[in-house]
Image: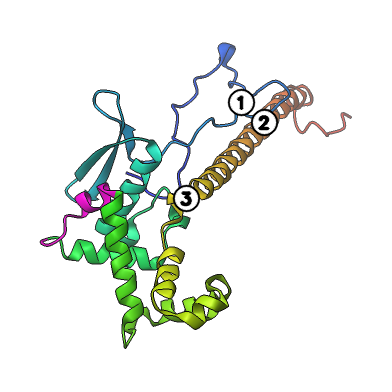
């Protein structure tokens, strides 16, 4: 199962056109390329009865073991569950549908949940958004309260120094619960925000369209090269050599 920023699904190879000529690239009127209507999420399928959406995650590539979770009310929720489970089980090998949505601290939280599999059922945890958000928020607050930040020192420095303007002077001065709440809010997964998700999907679809346009251009150049070569060959045969040779 591929895992990353969502990609166009590969189609079947195009057949040869009539007369042995290569098929023309698929175009819209005016020479454009078709715009993908919606994003095809990796690991997201319809439920068995056609109601709801399921997340299917490859959790052990060596054994081919998968976990199926759901149903969910929309494909976006299923895609996010897929991403979280994959990160928990596969770590750096995971390629989520929403890679830009995950702060490294959430990835670390998911890996810690996986390491405590005897105490935490990762799939059940991420399948319940309310339970997941509550547990993740508790984890974030505990990190901020640490007296020695250890592996989280970079995160804390980033929060108080690099992102101080996002916190606000009043909350920085007051501290306490408001500071913790802001810390939690600033490290939530971005994909839970419909506006961020819509913007991200538009960007991915535009990238897919640009890739299709580049592929179409390459096909047109290859076809032009073949046409040129076919026109030059009879001249070479006529003059017995290069098409630019001068007959004596």
Task: Name the image quarter holding the C terminus.
Answer: top right
Disc number lying in front (3 or 2) = 3
Q: How much space separates mark 1 and mark 2, taking CA atoms? A: 7 Å
Which residue in the structure is indicated by mark 3? 193
Q: Are marks 1 and 2 in contact (CB under 8 Å)?
A: yes
74 displayed left or right of 126: right
Residue at figure coordinates x 77%, y 22% from the top left: 238
Q: How much space separates mark 1 and mark 3, taking CA atoms? A: 38 Å
**For mark 1, does the 10 Å Cα neighbourhood hold few (<14), some (14 to 19), or many (20 or more) residues?**
some
Task: Answer above or below: position of 22 versus 205.
Answer: above
Q: Secondary structure at mark 1?
A: loop
Q: Position of residue 115 (x, y in %)?
A: 18, 65
Q: Which image quarter: residue 152?
A: bottom left
Q: Earlier in the sequence, mark 1 or mark 3?
A: 1
Query: Which mark, by number, is residue 220?
Result: 2
Task: Answer above or below: position of 119 versus 143.
Answer: above
Q: Is residue 168 or residue 56 the one in the foreground? A: 168
Q: How much space separates mark 3 and mark 2, taking CA atoms? A: 41 Å
Q: Position of residue 19 (x, y in %)?
A: 58, 11
Task: Answer above or below: position of 74 versus 120.
Answer: above
Q: Position of residue 150 (x, y in %)?
A: 32, 84
Q: Earlier in the sequence, mark 3 or mark 2?
A: 3
Which residue in the structure is indicated by mark 1? 25
Q: Which residues are magenta?
A: 118-128
Disc number lying in front (1 or 3) = 3
Total numbered labels placed on residues in the image: 3
Q: Is residue 190 or residue 6 the one in the foreground? A: 190
Task: Name the image quarter holding the N terminus.
Answer: top left
């Amino acid at each position: 199962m591929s895992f990353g920023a969502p990609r166009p699904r590969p189609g079947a190879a195009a057949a040869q056109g009539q007369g042995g000529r290569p098929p023309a690239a698929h175009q819209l009127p005016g020479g454009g390329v078709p715009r993908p209507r919606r994003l095809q999420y990796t690991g997201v399928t319809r439920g068995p009865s056609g109601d709801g959406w399921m997340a299917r995650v490859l959790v052990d590539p060596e054994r081919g073991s998968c976990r199926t979770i759901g149903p969910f009310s929309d494909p976006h929720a299923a895609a996010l569950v897929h991403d979280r489970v994959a990160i928990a089980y596969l770590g750096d090998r995971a390629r989520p549908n929403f890679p830009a949505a995950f702060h490294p601290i959430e990835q670390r939280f998911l890996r810690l949940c996986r390491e405590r599999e005897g105490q935490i059922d990762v799939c059940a945890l991420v399948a319940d958004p309310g339970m997941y958000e509550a547990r993740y928020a508790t984890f974030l607050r505990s990190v901020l309260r640490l007296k020695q930040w250890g592996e989280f020192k970079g995160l804390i420095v980033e929060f108080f120094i690099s992102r101080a303007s996002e916190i606000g002077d009043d909350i920085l001065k007051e501290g306490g619960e408001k500071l913790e709440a802001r810390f939690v809010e600033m490290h939530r997964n971005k994909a839970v925000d419909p506006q961020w998700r819509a913007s991200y999907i538009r960007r991915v679809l535009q990238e897919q369209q640009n890739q299709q346009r580049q592929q179409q251009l390459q096909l047109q150049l290859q076809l032009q090269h073949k046409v040129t070569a076919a026109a030059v060959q009879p001249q070479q045969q006529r003059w017995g050599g290069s098409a630019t040779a001068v007959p004596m």
